[in-house]
Amino acid sequence: MKKLDISVIPGDGIGKEVVPEALRVLDTIAKVHGGLTLNYTHYPWSSEYYVEHGKMMPDNGLDLLSQSDAIFLGAVGDPSLVKDHISLGGLLLKIRREFEQVINIRPAKQIKGIVSPLTNPRDFDIMIVRENSEGEYSSSGGRVHHGIDEIVVQNSIFTKKAVSRVMEYAFELARKRNGHLTSATKSNGIVHSMPFWDDVLAEVSQNYKDIPTKSEHIDALSAFFITKPHTLDVVVASNLFGDILSDIGAAIMGSIGIAPAGNINLNGKYPSMFEPVHGSAPDIYGKGIANPVGQIWTAKMMLDHFDEMEMGTVLLHAIEQTLQSGIKTPDIGGNSNTTEVTDAIIAKIEELA
């Protein structure tokens, strides 16, 4: 019997609604399929916690999280209580950085039962592999002077180590998917970092000659996500480019409310963290209409991470069959509430078993 210790952080807003629903689904699939025991430790770290304690997590928060096998996060942020840069920097980004979660993976897939805004989506199935530790989001730079003389410098930091490892991860993923790899670049306009990115791609690709590889400029690639997403498989990108492309991916799926993500630690020193792409949506919190699919699909990604692929596959099938039956929350054209969608997914899991 495999046992997994999961740190659960519902966080803010609808995170507090959809995380418990996803845990119900996880418990059901673990029980139905057997061979897996899930032990949860819940942490109430959130913007409300900050208001009370002056910090997003206690001083030993990372030590507590480090004892788990994975972190299951809901959403972070409530601007009415705490400024976003404080809430994100004190919880989500702090965990990503301190736990060396150097890769972010986000699927963009045509989901049965959800109407894509694309006229002819043609069953696209993309996995975006985003460098998650440096690049354009490096905290390097500053502001000097004031008024008309003010100067701002924002440095992008790219290292051979980080770029190589995200590309190696992407190539390995493409090999498992029996697919191909596309690299996002902009070497015709960003004349230092992006040619370096391209050079590393050429070097790493020598070890993956069985994987068809191409490089596309980010502006063209963004258009391809909309005009011909079915031609893409694994897409590897820098921090900023991966962030943009994954939001386009969520849009062509039909709703950012269904998109999952994983922040992956590669060296085994710390747990990885799984979170939906959507935010805390304070405008709908408490109304019972939050879409739980993003959090539940995130649970599927966590199962896959632990090589529980069969459970993950069943879970995704249950999601799709529930949506196809018309049981959906209002954001994707339905009239069901959060709990009703979860109940239907659980029933489908039991039926599929």
Image: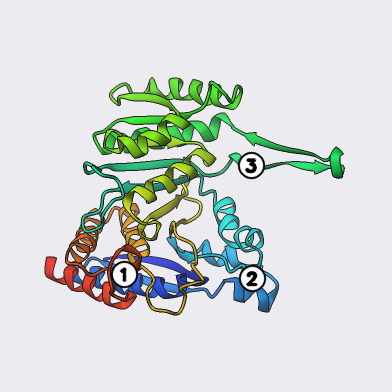
Measure how far apart labels 3 and 1 are at the Cα level: 37 Å
Q: What quarter of the picture does the N terminus occupy?
A: bottom left
Circle 2: element type: loop
Query: Which amino acid does the dot numbered 1 rest on?
Result: Thr
Circle 1 packing at 10 Å, graded few (<14), some (14-19), many (20+), is many
261 vs 163: above or below: below
* Residue bearing the label numbered 3: 138
Foreground: 302 or 292?
Answer: 292
Instruction: In the displayed orientation, state which residue is furthest to the front.
Output: 119
* Quadrant (top left, top right, bottom left, bottom right) of the C terminus: bottom left
> Secondary structure under badge 1?
loop
User: Mark 2 belongs to which amino acid?
Assistant: Pro
Q: Return the disc, 3 or 1, that comes first in the chain's sequence.
A: 3
Measured in 3D between alpha carbons, the distance from the residue under mark 2 to the one under mark 1, in whole angstroms, is 35 Å
Residue 329 - label: 1
Instruction: Please say whether residue 168 is visible from this viewpoint.
Output: no
Q: Are discs 3 and 1 less than 8 Å apart at CB?
A: no
The image quarter in which residue 32 lies: bottom left
User: As drawn, is 348 to the left or to the right of 336?
Assistant: left
Judged from the image, the secondary structure of the residue bearing numbered disc 3 is: strand
Which of the pair 213/222 is nearer the observer? 222
Crowd rating for badge 3 (residues with CA inside 10 Å; few <14, some 14–19, many 20+): some
Q: Sequence order check: which comes first, mark 3 or mark 2?
A: 2
| Quadrant of residue 79 within the rendered picture | bottom right
Q: Which residue is mark 2?
A: 58
For the residues bearing labels 2 and 1, Cβ distance under 8 angstroms? no
Query: Where does the image place residue 65, in percent across and percent down from the top left?
Result: 52, 64
Classify 287 as above or below 294.
below
